[in-house]
Amino acid sequence: MVLYHPKNTSRCETTMETKPAPAAPSGGMETAVSTVPKIRDIGTIALEALGKIDTVLAFELSVMNDHMKSMEGENALIKAENDMLKAKLVQQKEDEADIYYYLHKKLDANYEVIAQLESDIQTVKLERDAMDKAFHIKQDETQDAFAKEKKELTERIESAEDTLHALEVFRERKIVLEDTIAAMESTLAAEKDNHKKNLLARTEDQLDTTTKRTMMENDQMISELQYQSKETEKLLVKYKALETEVVHLRLQLKVNKDTEVEMAKRTHFYQKLIKKLNERVQSDHVAARTHAALAQGQERTKTDVNKANEDMIALLQTKSNGLETQLRTLCAELADARTHVDEARAEKHAMLAQQDDTLRFLSVAIHDITHQLALSGHGHAAPSSLHAWQAGDVIPAKLDDLAPSDVKKVLQMLFGKLHAYQAAIVSAESKRNTGASRNISTLYHHVDRTKNRPRNRREGDGHIGHEDGGRSSVVTTAAGRLGASVLLSTGSSRPTIKTRIVLPDAHRMSLPSAAVSPG
């Protein structure tokens, strides 16, 4: 007997098949063997061979036979398990071959993806290098432009500083010239007083002399007076030339001040209202002094001119105070007007909202009636008692008594009336807001137009205002009394000055959008 091992399965089978059968006993046993089937167990053969002589040996053979049967069964199970394992092994080999093929295919695809990604990385690197170069080029261009702009601004600042230095030098020269003119005027006045005293003294000394001596002295005095008259005329000519030069210098000073104001506006955007008023007071002061100097001429002395200038300064100071008071009043009135406009706009929106609800209700009602007529077919068959509704027709008290088509006509008429009423309200509001915006624009630009008028026309306006008796008027508009004009007069010898307050652009209050567009 051979023990079981997976590798010795075929050997075990061969041994079991080729094992020779024991020799059969002769005689009567041969007949029994011939009658037994060919397939018999060893125990039966052994019992037949022994003839049941040795019972113990027969029992052992039987036990061995049972053990061999169990071993054969186990061998069959092991064979089946071996076949199953072989099948699994074959399947696993096939699966491993498929997995190996799939992995190789996947690796090839991954190699292709890796190659593509590497090429993309190279492309991205090239693009990044190009972008870096473009960025550096653009940065260099920006730095060059900035340096150029900085250089231009530096040159402009240097030019402005040179101009400012020139203006300061001019101001110093102006002060020196004014001091020189004042000294010359005082010297001229002293010389005139001395001449007058000398003439009076000579006249008193000559009263006690004889007539002949008086006549001789009169002749001599006449010649001296002629000489003095010539000298005086020369002095007057020099004085007139000096006055003309002073006028030109004052005009040049005014032009320089205007230039300085313009430069200040360019560098600091817009000045505040008080500063602008002070500049206007100064310009009006210079204009008034120039006008007074040209109007009086040779007939007025320097003392009267100084007095007139002091009066004009007081007038301009009074005017400045009045303008400040009027500015505060106008600001308060503007705030009240804006409050009223907001309240009116809120009321208008509420009214339009209610009208919109009414119009929507009527539109829905008309749609329902139309749908009802389409379903019932009464749009053409039902008789209509309301053929043509006009504005003056009487509508029945009960709409339930009317046909659906007549109810539809009534609702359409009401819808048209409400729509027309709403359009009229919107149009009126638009016209009112347009008028208000025009009044505000007129208020903002009136003084600029007045400032650009010729000087003689302004003076003419001032004399006209003086002839009217110094009346002061305040213009009130529908937008809330946004415009105002003031007349200031100090006496019969002073022109009336009329002006309006204009806020600079930096201090203007923006108009609400609803004031321009209706609704």
Image (cartoon, helix red, strand yellow):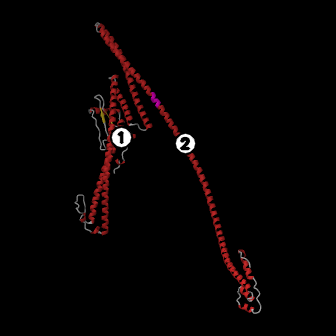
Q: Which mark is residue 143?
A: 2
Residue 222 visible in the snapshot: no
Could you tell me the amino acid type at mark 2? Gln
Between residues 85 and 102, which one lies in front from this camera angle? 85
Where residue 196 appears, x then y in whole percent? 33, 15
Distance between the alpha carbons at the discs numbered 1 and 2: 43 Å
In this picture, is 489 found above or below 345? Answer: above
Residue 15 visible in the snapshot: yes
Where residue 491 appears, x then y in whole percent? 28, 29
Q: Which mark is residue 444?
A: 1
Whether residue 422 appears in magenta in the rendering, the answer is no
Q: Residue at x 28, y 57 (%)?
A: 417
In this picture, is 452 found above or below 432? Answer: above
Looking at the rendered structure, the number of numbered marks drawn on it comes to: 2
Where residue 10 appears, x then y in whole percent? 72, 78
Q: Residue at x 65, y 70 (%)?
A: 92
Q: Residue 466: which quarter of the image?
A: top left
Classified by dominant secondary structure, the portion drawn in magenta counts as: helix
User: Which residues, given as a range, are shown in magenta?
Assistant: 164-169
Image quarter in which the N terminus is found: bottom right
User: Which element carries disc 1, helix, strand or loop?
Assistant: helix
User: Which element carries disc 2, helix, strand or loop?
Assistant: helix
Q: Residues within 10 Å of mark 2 (few under 14, many from 20)?
A: few
